[in-house]
Amino acid sequence: MTDAPHVTVDPFAGAVRKFGEPHPARAVLRAAGPIVQAEAPAGGPVWIITDDVLAREVLIHPQIVKDPAYAPASWDPRTAGLEPAAAAQPSLTTYDGPAHERLRRAHAPLFTARRMSDYSDRIAAHAHQLLTGLADAGGTVDLMADFTTRFPLTVVCDVLGVPLDRIDQAIAACRGMYSDDPEEVGAAMAAFGELAAAALSDGRDGLAVELLDRIPNEITETQLHYLLFTLIYAGQLTTDPSLGFLLARVFAAEGATSEATTIDEFVRETLRLHPPAPFSLWRFTSADVELAGVRLPARSPVLIDIQGINTDPGRSIGPDLTFGAGPHYCTGAQLAQLELRAVVEVLRSGFPRARLAVPLAELRQVDLGGIQGSRLAALPVRLRG
Ligand code: HEM
């Protein structure tokens, strides 16, 4: 049994780099081995998996769990960005084993490709309406400021049944989650509660109401609000930066040089190269575990380097890890891809002369730090050429 090699680069540092410039830590992590040790943002070691096969083993390992109750005792849950422990708050993202399976069974049938395809026309209509509004305002628009957050929130709220006059509230709540001020985060969570309650109110007929009928009986109304918060927030947090990268690639005409022959393939390729969740969410060992000859004591934090694995030049072709794998595979994968495809289609059909308002080389992406991904700082575009 050996120790995992320690890396000296900080894979969690915030930074600004050119769009498309590789993240400086990825190759270093990969070169160090299939499992490497770094300093966790909340202190102490974190074990990072850089190998595709080992990652898939970890993602189904019964003793590598999501429940923050197993986080290192020294971590401050707030600075570590941890959710409440599973015993305090049921969530797809913190439940493990049979409890997680039950919650998945409640959610999964609502988000299948077939169910989501029922919303295709509405999703395209939202994209068209929002882009038309921006184009009509004339001149240059920053799609990162005025489109990439609003569009996925409009879609996920519409699908869940949140009234669409509450989108500004949803945007403010999502932005509030980035605050360092616990009061602002508390206010954002309260706003999410109101959005959830609105989706469940009399006469609403979105998926929130269907979820209410499907969740296990012991789940309280407040706990259901949290489940709905997870869907809204996860639906914005990821699709928002992805839209920026996708649109930048469309404007850069990378479609012409990419291997993708269809819009779906172009979307998948973008997601593989620019996964909005560059690391998995936190996992922890619930007992001593051995991985690739390395012993991890109980309560060790483990992350999957999704971006590093997706872009590993030595990786054999197969499904990427953009949406994860195993029991926690992304619930919204079909919805997200539908949204991304719809935007490319609407842009091509409705705004054929749209172009970047600055040279591609001027686009910057901001690594937000920690396990958060990166996001284009701005995407200035002239929608009518
Ligand atoms: C491009 C867009 C998206 C990407 C790349 C993405 C990525 C991911 C990844 C990697 C995971 C697994 C995390 C882990 O195992 O540690 C995940 C889980 C999840 N995602 Fe997404 N996601 C996206 C969009 C969405 C949308 C639109 C929704 C909402 C409908 C959503 C809801 C969820 C939920 C609820 C989970 C937790 C599932 C579970 O733990 O069982 N995601 N996502």
Image (cartoon, rainbow, N blue to C red):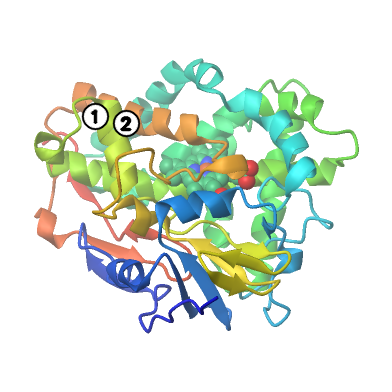
Q: How many marks?
A: 2
Tell me where residue 304 appears, x and y as whole percent. 48, 59
Q: Secondary structure at mark 1?
A: helix
Query: Can the viewer see residue 236 in this picture?
Result: no
Who's the residue at 43% across and 46% down the image?
A: 321
Who's the residue at 60% across and 69% down the image?
A: 301
Query: Can the viewer see residue 66 in this picture?
Result: yes
Tell me where residue 258 appears, x and y as whole percent. 15, 38
Asked whether 146 or 16 is in front, the reply is: 16
Who's the residue at 57% across and 42% down the image?
A: 326
Q: Which quadrant is the C terminus positioned in?
A: top left
Direction from residue 248 to residue 324 in the image, left or right:
right
Question: On the image, numbered disc 2 is attached to which residue?
Answer: 343
Inspect the image, locate mark 1, and give the three-letter code of the amino acid beneath it.
Answer: Leu
**Disc 1 and disc 2 in contact, CB within 8 angstroms:** yes
Q: Secondary structure at mark 2?
A: helix
Image quadrant of residue 107?
top right
Question: On the image, numbered disc 1 is attached to which residue?
Answer: 347
Inspect the image, locate mark 2, and give the three-letter code of the amino acid beneath it.
Answer: Val
Q: Which quadrant is the N terminus positioned in?
A: bottom right
Q: Is 31 rendered above or below residue 320?
A: below
Image quadrant of residue 376?
bottom left
Mark 1 is surrounded, within 10 Å at the Cα level, by few (under 14), some (14 to 19) or many (20 or more) other residues, namely many
Query: From the Cβ of disc 2, is ligand 1 less than 8 Å away?
Result: no
